[in-house]
Image (cartoon, rainbow, N blue to C red):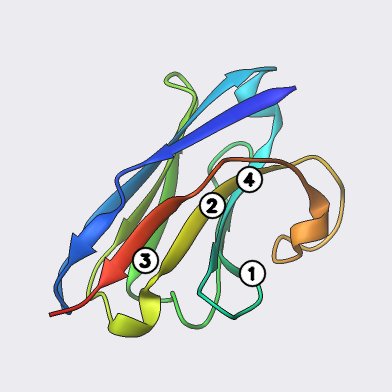
Amino acid sequence: QVQLVESGGGLVQPGGSLRLSCAASGRTFSNYAMGWFRQAPGKEREFVAAISWSGINTYYADSAKGRFTISRDNAKNTVYLQMDSLKPTDTAVYYCAAKSRSGSYDRSDKYTYWGQGTQVTVSS
């Protein structure tokens, strides 16, 4: 089992920044690729970004490229999502997840463990 706890969400104005954190406990964190997904009200959960177990490879949704940066610190068992130039369309609950199944990083069914989510609201 891997337990994941997200933090860092909140209310921010358009154009602002937030840094989400996801702290992991349980099984060896460095064994897992990690991903961030988000779900807006009335919409499907969608992929945002992912990072390989080593941190060398990163993957982004088109909506996140150039604005969001995913990173990880295996010594701290934590993955981060730095979000800049935020837009109202980024408003959603953001979830981190641990990937244990082979396959595409942008598929939520490849992730086994999920956090409870943190709300991000972008509004003036």
* First of labels 1, 2 by sequence position: 1
Residue that numbered label 1 is attached to: 45
Residue that numbered label 3 is attached to: 68
Q: Position of residue 103 (x, y in %)?
A: 85, 58
* First of labels 3, 1 by sequence position: 1
Residue that numbered label 2 is attached to: 95
Secondary structure beneath label 1: loop
Q: Amino acid at mark 2?
A: Tyr
Name the residue rendered at 45%, 19% in the picture: 75
Does the CB distance between marks 4 and 2 fall below 8 Å?
Answer: yes
Q: Position of residue 13 (x, y in %)?
A: 14, 73
Does the CB distance between marks 1 and 2 fall below 8 Å?
Answer: yes
Q: Position of residue 120 (x, y in %)?
A: 34, 62
What's the CA distance linking mark 2 and mark 3? 15 Å
Between 1 and 40, which is closer to the camera in this rendering? 40
Residue that numbered label 4 is attached to: 97
